[in-house]
Amino acid sequence: MSQSLFEKVWDAHVVEQLPGGNALLFVDRIVAHEITTPQGALEIEQRYGDELFDKRRIVAMNDHVSPAKDTETAIQAKVLRQWAKRHGITLYDIGDNGICHVIAPERGHIEPGMTVICGDSHTCTLGAFGAFALGIGTTVQTGAMLAGCVVLERPKVMRVTVNGRLGHGATAKDLALYVISTLTFKGATGYAIEYRGEAIDALSMDERMTLCNMAVEAGGTTAMIAPDETTFSYLRGRENQPQGEAFETNVSRWRALRSDPDARYDKELALDVGSLRPMVSWGTNPGESVPLDGRVPADADKKSLEYMDLAPGDALRGLPVDQAFIGSCTNSRLADLRAAGEVLRGRKVSVPTIITPGSQAVKRAAEKEGLHDVFQDAGALWTHSSCGPCLGMSMGVVAPGSRCISSSNRNFPGRMGAGARVHLASPTVVAASAILGRIASPEELGPIVSLEKVAAER
Amino acid sequence: MIVEGKVLPVDRANVDTDQIIPAFLLTGITSTGLGVHLFKGMTGGPDLLAAHPDASIVVTRENFGCGSSREHAAWALADRGIRAVVAPSFARIFQENAYNNGVAPVTVDAAEIDALLAAPSLKIDLEAETLTTPEGRAIKFSLDPLRKRFLLEGGYLDFLANKRDAVRSWLNRDHVRPG
């Protein structure tokens, strides 16, 4: 029988069918961070003799607030550290860590066909590898640490075919915002999305991760992309992957992980991105996004408008911003930093700008290319890797009423700080906006270079 | 099991988990004591709670619990004495977390919400899957048959612990997976 990519991965992991459309699903990889893991680690220690099902399937990292900001977060990091050490679990810690969804694939822990869970909603990022990867709560993660499985209701499958090629300054982030604004903030609830099509084939792994990262912002359980040569090239030679013939044997197995031609889907959506332009959010969820040249819709949600201090018909381009952030599990990989660097090179930011790489390895790779000089010459703060300002939990909190243009994934009320107003965009739009102090696209910067020259001559 | 109590009307859609409990309050290593932080991330949230101090049923609009996977949202609701959330739809992860923490996710038609937001109290029979308004009107809803057990009795982790042998034999029988 013909199967979709999702069905192939799902069926290979069903240990037992359970009542109500649920399955006992085997989990190949558990990614464990310091905010949502300690509670479960302690519960297993207290109630189940500290016995883990298979420690080799777990990778851990201190990432959300690392280094710790206070005593409480220091304790979270310590509990995770001690737990990992006690069980011999691979741990990425201060100096060699990074955001879970950046570092897990970067260090070769994610493969096509795997099932992956993490106590973080953006785990769908890892579906970019053709894995079934999803965010879950602490109890469900704890159950997987204890018994190797999750209880999960089988999602429906939505195929999203993306025709055309990205151009005109549009990036994977803009595609993600476009998809979410089309589906709405809850339009993919109950679905696993499968992305396919010409535009998807052309994306790098970094870009595919950006796209899949935001599936949860449409309510999706996950997004998946069938593995191809781009995927295999990314994994070939990577640490924690088998090398040589053993790896190529895996590749030949992974080639079967694509939807059969007559696979059936519960829902289908076809988009053409040939004319897509950079997007920006205006409201308080990522579905409330429009093209950068667009305006706040006439039927905009009143509570969103009130929070964002906007009115229907307001233009997004030109809206003054107070702060800028490039980073987060959506847009903090080397490709994102390179793109931002192209815009920032030789220019100056005019508002406080924070650039946070997704991992220490990304940081070092960026520095080998001189990007740290580009960013710092532009007047931006170049930080260590972490989740950073994205969730208003540690550094870079945005003040009430201030507007922040951000490459992150959530513009929720209070997300980056109480009363903070967040506009989501691509790293290049964030960089251009940071320079101009208002929401702007990079193409506006042509004249700015000459203005700078004028200023210098004066 | 019957949940009968006063309503906390949260008249907005897309209440994300950052609004239910903001990230800067997720710095603990236990699941307890989070009720004091409930709705601290929502504009007017603390005032709303102060106006309904002994409410045990949240009524709200679509897509409740969207966003972050933080189980702290369900922990904060449960710790504050919230036993059920009535909404037209829920985000997946929140719904799973709610079931696992004794907070019933009660899905009703969106057309019912205006009336339920105005109701001072509600009665919810979780076994019979029926919600009753103060005027005596009954509205049926359905719970996941497996998770209903976790909701009423707890025991998600024990359920999984009891599956360990079956999982091991499944692994030995059919599957050699990357470790």
Image: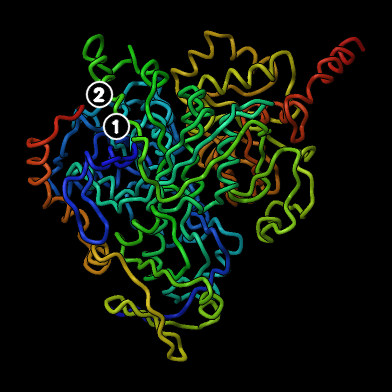
Residue occupied by mark 1: A113
Give the quadrant of the C terminus of chain A: top right
Q: Dot 1 falls on which chain?
A: A
Please report the residue visible at 39 percent of the width from the left and 24 percent of the height from the top: A97
Pointer 1 and pointer 2: residues touching (CB < 8 Å)? Answer: yes
The residue furthest bottom is B135
Give the residue displayed 80% in from the left and 37% down from the top: A318
Number of on-image labels: 2
Q: Secondary structure at mark 2?
A: helix
The three-letter code of the residue at mark 1 reads: Gly
Q: CA distance from mark 1 to mark 2?
A: 9 Å
User: Given the image, what chain letter belongs to the residue carrying mark 2?
Assistant: A
Q: Quadrant of residue A110?
A: top left
The answer to whether residue B159 of the structure is visible from this angle is yes
Residue A398 location, quadrant: top right
Q: Residue at x 78, y 28 (%)?
A: A436
The disc at residue A253 is 2
Q: Earlier in the sequence, mark 1 or mark 2?
A: 1
